[in-house]
Image (cartoon, rainbow, N blue to C red):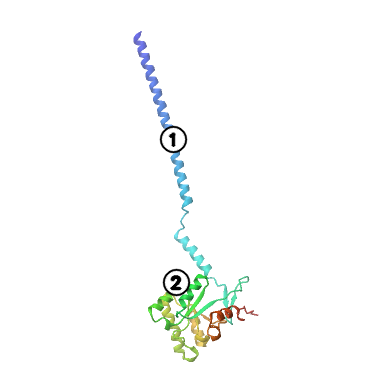
């Protein structure tokens, strides 16, 4: 009898221990599931945050496409230079109140200073250069600086030669030798040509066109006139000159 009671007690204790063990295993399994779920949530959160902080990087081809598109937009011409050297809008609605600033005989003593002032004012300009100003490394570096500041560089002949007074071979040399020198210094050939004194010949016009350059002159300027060579006088005439207007083309 006592032996039976003792066995029953042992069985009961074993059953109780098994029950506790199962409960612990179940609790541990639930905790593992919860931890696993929390880790998944944290991983997804981290991924989302990373996506927000680091936007997807465009492929090289996509970036090239965007850069090419921007380049084309920036290069689209808005104006032409008409027969009297005024800017004429190509499309209707384009602002007509514009001027094109051009500076000859660069890089002389004041070219870099003018370029810095124009850059501060965010005013574009074309600097027409002469080859005889580019015979020293200092002047070549000055031209590089002007170009690196974003200004266009134009050809104004090598020696500031009046092209109507020399034969065609010299006319060719005055233009092409300077093109080569400018290309050597800044890495690109000039796109613009202006003859000293505005004196062109038919040969020059054909050569410039063949070289893919734009023949340019000026619509007005007074800086070489002695009475306008003071600061106040040149400012007044350049802002109020009768030529400062658009010419209607019929």
What residue is shown with label 1?
A: 33
**Would residue 177 be seen by someone viewing this image from the given angle?**
no
User: Could you tell me which residue is drawn at 47 percent across and 50 percent down?
Assistant: 51
Q: Quadrant of residue 184?
A: bottom left
- Horizontal arrangement in the rendering, residue 3 relative to residue 85 (left or right): left
Residue 52 lies, in percent from the top left, at: 48, 50
User: Could you tell me which residue is drawn at 34 percent across and 10 percent down?
Assistant: 3
Residue 41 lies, in percent from the top left, at: 46, 41
Up-down: is 69 above or below 99?
Answer: above
**Would residue 35 be seen by someone viewing this image from the given angle?**
yes
In this rendering, the count of numbered labels is 2
Residue 249 lies, in percent from the top left, at: 64, 79
Up-down: is 45 above or below 125?
Answer: above
Q: Residue furthest right?
A: 250
Q: Residue furthest top?
A: 1
User: Could you tell me which residue is drawn at 40 percent across and 24 percent down?
Assistant: 20
First-in-chain label (2 vs 1): 1
Q: CA distance from mark 2 to mark 1?
A: 64 Å
Q: Which mark is residue 144?
A: none
Label 2 CA crowd tier, 10 Å (few <14, some 14–19, many 20+): few
What residue is shown with label 2?
A: 148
Label 1 CA crowd tier, 10 Å (few <14, some 14–19, many 20+): few
- Horizontal arrangement in the rendering, residue 196 relative to residue 16 (left or right): right
């Amino acid at each position: 009898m006592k032996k039976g009671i003792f066995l029953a007690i042992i069985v009961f204790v074993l059953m109780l221990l098994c029950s506790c063990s199962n409960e612990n295993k179940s609790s541990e399994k639930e905790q593992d599931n919860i931890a696993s779920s929390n880790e998944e949530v944290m991983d997804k959160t981290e991924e989302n945050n990373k996506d927000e902080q680091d936007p997807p990087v465009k492929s090289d081809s996509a970036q090239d496409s965007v850069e090419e598109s921007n380049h084309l937009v920036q290069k689209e011409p808005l104006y032409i230079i008409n027969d009297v050297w005024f800017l004429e809008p190509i499309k209707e609605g384009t602002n007509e109140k514009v001027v094109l600033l051009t500076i000859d005989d660069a890089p002389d003593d004041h070219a870099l200073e003018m370029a810095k002032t124009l850059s501060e004012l965010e005013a574009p300009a074309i600097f027409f250069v002469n080859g005889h100003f580019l015979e020293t490394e200092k002047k070549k570096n000055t031209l590089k600086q002007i170009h690196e500041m974003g200004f266009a560089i134009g050809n104004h002949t090598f020696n500031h030669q009046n092209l109507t007074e020399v034969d065609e071979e010299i006319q060719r040399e005055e233009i092409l030798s300077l093109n080569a020198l400018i290309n050597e210094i800044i890495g690109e050939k000039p796109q613009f040509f202006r003859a000293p004194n505005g004196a062109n010949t038919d040969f020059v016009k054909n050569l410039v066109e063949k070289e893919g350059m734009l023949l340019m002159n000026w619509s007005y300027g007074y800086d070489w006139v002695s009475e306008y060579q003071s600061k106040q006088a040149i400012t007044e005439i350049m802002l109020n000159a009768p030529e400062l207007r658009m010419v209607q083309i019929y």
